Image: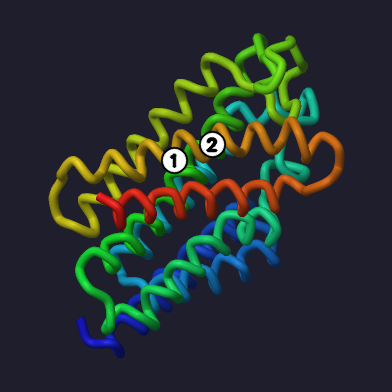
Amino acid sequence: MELITQIIISGVLSVTLSAVAYRLKMLTLSGALASLVVGYTVGVLGSIEWLILLVTFTAAGLIATRMDLGEKSKYGLQEGNSGERTYKNVLGVGIPACVFAILYGVFHAYLSGKYDLALTVAFITTLTVAAADTVASEIGIRDRKVWLITTFERVKRGTNGGVSVLGTAASVAAALFTGIIGWLLIFKGLDVYVLIPITMGILGNLIDSVLGATFENRGKISKYTNNCISATIGALLGMIIILFL
């Protein structure tokens, strides 16, 4: 695809997604602007397929956020006032994706096949981690039986670092869905390597829970920083596995 075409399509998709999400009150104005920047960066420096995967993840995450919103609001467990997400939510997920898109865009022409694959896997992994975490939080909130991941003591729903059977199952399903869709979009088929972003997505979500229990609960980091760190760790681990296979 010619660069000018890629730039135009990326702009149209990014603006459309951000405008629709803002109109539906799924994103605040700051969230919509951040979404526009993230989408445009990924589309231009990564590829249109990367952007489509990002759009798919974003749409699925926003839908999961709106599920059982009344129940979440009843207990004060919703995002914002009515499930809307701000620029902090968007950048917590979007920064790792943008970093690997920028690296890919800058170095793609100079990379061998393995390094090119490693960066692509890293990008997909940032979204499998984000998808697993988002769905685990938004769907898992239904489960009343929650345990702290570090001590396994029972805690209230919505506690940072809390895990449940429903949330864990949902996170695995989200990582599988995102990893497979991403692989099909970018590589036009499936092979055994797809297990890397899927596995790292599940692991990244668990890392997020551990960081939530140990640092976020103590006010050392925000949930947005936690999202960013856990996605980056998962992506780097995925890269390392590819490079040393």
Residue at which label 2 appears: 205
Please, what secondary structure does the residue beneath circle 2 have? helix
| Residue 196, horizontal then vertical, whole percent | 32, 43
Residue at which label 1 appears: 201
| Residue 66, horizontal then vertical, whole percent | 58, 37
Q: Residue at x 64, y 53 (%)?
A: 25
| Residue 77, horizontal then vertical, whole percent | 74, 31
Q: Quadrant of the N terminus?
A: bottom left
Please, what secondary structure does the residue beneath circle 1 have? helix
Residue 6 lies, with reference to residue 119, above or below; the image says: below
Q: How is the image coloured?
A: rainbow
Which residue of the protein is positioned furthest toward the front in this rendering? 244
Q: Residue at x 42, y 70 (%)?
A: 101
Image quarter of residue 123: bottom left
Which residue of the protein is positioned furthest toward the bottom in this rendering? 4
Q: Amino acid at mark 2?
A: Asn
Q: Contact, CB < 8 Å: mark 2 with mark 1?
A: yes
Q: Which residue occupies the foreground of this view, 167 or 26?
A: 167
Q: Residue at x 30, y 53 (%)?
A: 244
Q: Which residue occupies the foreground of this view, 8 or 107?
A: 107
